[in-house]
Image: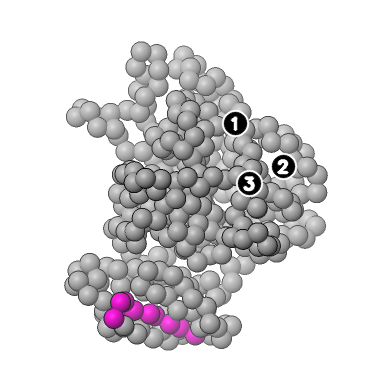
Amino acid sequence: MRLKIHWLTVVLVSFSAAGFSQSKKNTTIPKTYVASKTITPITIDGDESDPSWSKAEWTDLFEDIENGIKPKYATKVKMLWDETNFYILAKIDEPHVWANLKQRDTIIFYNNDFEVFIDPDSDTFNYYELEINALNTAWDLFLSKPYRENDLVVLNDWNLTGLKSVVKVQGTLNNPNDIDQGWVLEMAIPWAAYKTSYFDQNVPVDKFWRVNFSRVNWQHSIVDGKYERKKDADGKFLPEYNWVWSPMGVINMHEPEKWGYVYFSSKEGKDTFTIPQDEKVKWELYNLYRAQKEYFQKNKSWAKSLTNLTKDVISIDNKVLKPILENHSSGYNISVKSPFSNQTFIIKQDGKIITK
């Protein structure tokens, strides 16, 4: 993704080039996936022929992050879980498999890479990012809140302890003289890496987490027999392609409320998952939040009436929502009572949702 990188002690401050341009009202429905529990152990070796994977379904093929255009090369994922790990298998078609970044926690998306985004509690705060290239070099990050809040939000020295990952190249790595099929990335992410405390029982049995996957792909040149990112006539790198599982509608992965839903089923055999209606209530709150951000950019103050944010009646499944906007000295709250659960959801000026 397009980021400008600045270092400050051990904190990485990253700003997406599109991260502060507010996306319009989100009409994209997040993708869903049911991850089954695996009984037999999975050997992390980059080989998709493991018998456990034969019982899992592929996701839909990845799409362009913004506009739904079909990518040039296919990408798809399978997921499984057990009491210890979240297992991910990514199949990445690529006729020229190359990578040159070998040091952990370098800016891996300067190579073609595969990225994992995880928000365990679905509140858009305190989420995790993992990037891996074809050399199996990892960059793992913890973000206390999305970049759009323009704070020092990234902890780069956080490590995904216990991560197991293996890349298997279907062809020859860094050889421009032949055509490759692509590469397979297999990984096991321990649930323990996402614990918020020692006693946190965070294995999501029959629960969902917000998850998304991204593939960054660059046009390349071959210089002195080696792959490089391609430049234009002015010597600037051409923009990368961003292909994702669940489309975002904007070139910015850091809007976690738009990520997909992965449901971790304990049921033997196939299971189904339907996005809860209360999640749709939260989507509407985020639409109002984005409208407030846009209003503030134009007027240098928060809107004091919902009519300044939308003229539309907000409804979900024929149930009308009645949000309430309250301004205060440091910002605002927008609250709404769910007609489905009678819970009240409150979104604050920083995008944090509180449930009452």
Residue 171 inside the magenta-drawn segment: no
Q: Please report the residue visible at 45 percent of the width from the left and 17 percent of the height from the top.
A: 176
Hey, what amino acid is under mark 3?
Ile
User: Where residue 288 sits: x, y (%)?
Assistant: 36, 74
Q: Which residue is mark 3?
A: 189
Residue 53 is marked as: 2
Residue 336 inside the magenta-drawn segment: yes
Residue sitting at the far front: 9
Q: Looking at the image, can residue 70 be seen?
A: no
User: Where residue 340 sits: x, y (%)?
Assistant: 57, 82
- Label 3 or label 1, whichever lies nearer to me, is 3
- Label 2 or label 1, whichever lies nearer to me, is 1
Picture quarter containing residue 160? top right
Mark 1 crowd level (few <14, some 14–19, many ≥20, 10 Å Cα): many
- Is residue 59 shown above or below 75? below
Q: Would you say 329 lies left or right of 78 here?
A: left
* CA–CA distance in space, label 3 to label 1: 15 Å
* CA–CA distance in space, label 2 to label 1: 16 Å
Q: Secondary structure at mark 1?
A: strand
User: Where residue 66 sits: x, y (%)?
Assistant: 38, 52
Labelled pair 3, 2 in contact (Cβ < 8 Å): no
Q: Would you say 162 lies left or right of 181 here?
A: right
Residue segment shown in magenta: 329-337
Q: Secondary structure at mark 2?
A: helix
What secondary structure is the stretch in magenta mostly built from?
strand
Hey, what amino acid is under mark 1?
Val
Q: Secondary structure at mark 3?
A: strand
Q: Which residue is mark 1?
A: 167
Q: Would you say 182 lies left or right of 335 here?
A: right
Labelled pair 2, 1 in contact (Cβ < 8 Å): no
Quarter of the figure that contains the N terminus: top left
User: Where residue 182 sits: x, y (%)?
Assistant: 54, 29
